[in-house]
Amino acid sequence: MNKGTIWTIVGVIVAVLIAWFLVTVLFSVLAFLVKLLIVAVVAVIVFFVLRMIFSHSGDSDS
């Protein structure tokens, strides 16, 4: 093996390791964003349900 072949193999290994790290980070960020979106949607639903419950209970008192 010549010097160029060794550097090519090292370059491929480094490229795969960097790509693996970047994909892991990307999936972690995407998973966080999806969780954040789901939490926001559930929070809005819960907010309106609680608002509806308390507005109905307030109407019956007056």
Image: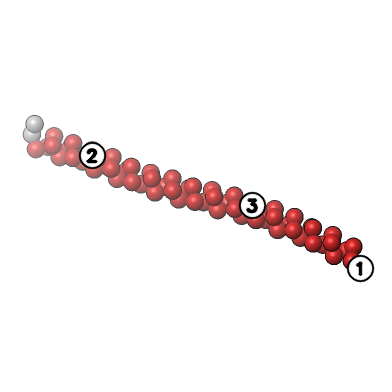
Instruction: Name the secondary structure under disc 2.
Output: helix
Q: Amino acid at mark 3?
A: Val
- The reply, left or right, for residue 20 in relation to residue 14 is right
Q: Which mark is residue 62?
A: 1
Q: Which of the two marks, 1 or 2, is nearer to us in this view?
A: 1
The image shows residue 1 at horizontal and vertical percentages of 8, 31
| Residue 23 position by quadrant | top left
Q: Is residue 61 above or below residue 48?
A: below
Residue extending farthest to the bottom is 62
The image shows residue 35 at horizontal and vertical percentages of 54, 50
Which of these two is toward me, 8 or 60?
Answer: 60
Mark 2 or mark 3, earlier in chain: 2
Residue extending farthest to the left is 2
Residue drawn at the location 69% of the way across and 55% of the way down: 46
What residue sits right under mark 2 in the picture?
Answer: 13
Which of these two is toward me, 48 or 9?
Answer: 48
Residue drawn at the location 70% of the way across and 53% of the way down: 45
Residue drawn at the location 79% of the way across and 62% of the way down: 54
Binning the other alpha carbons within 10 Å of mark 1 as few (below 14), some (14 to 19) or many (20 upward) gives few
Q: Which mark is residue 3?
A: none
Q: Amino acid at mark 2?
A: Ile
| Residue 50 position by quadrant | bottom right
- The reply, left or right, for residue 30 in relation to residue 43 is left
Spatial CA distance of label 2 from label 3 is 42 Å
- The reply, left or right, for residue 17 in relation to residue 29 is left
Binning the other alpha carbons within 10 Å of mark 2 as few (below 14), some (14 to 19) or many (20 upward) gives few
Residue drawn at the location 65% of the way across and 56% of the way down: 43
Spatial CA distance of label 1 from label 3 is 32 Å
Mark 1 or mark 3, earlier in chain: 3
What residue sits right under mark 3 in the picture?
Answer: 41
Spatial CA distance of label 1 from label 2 is 74 Å
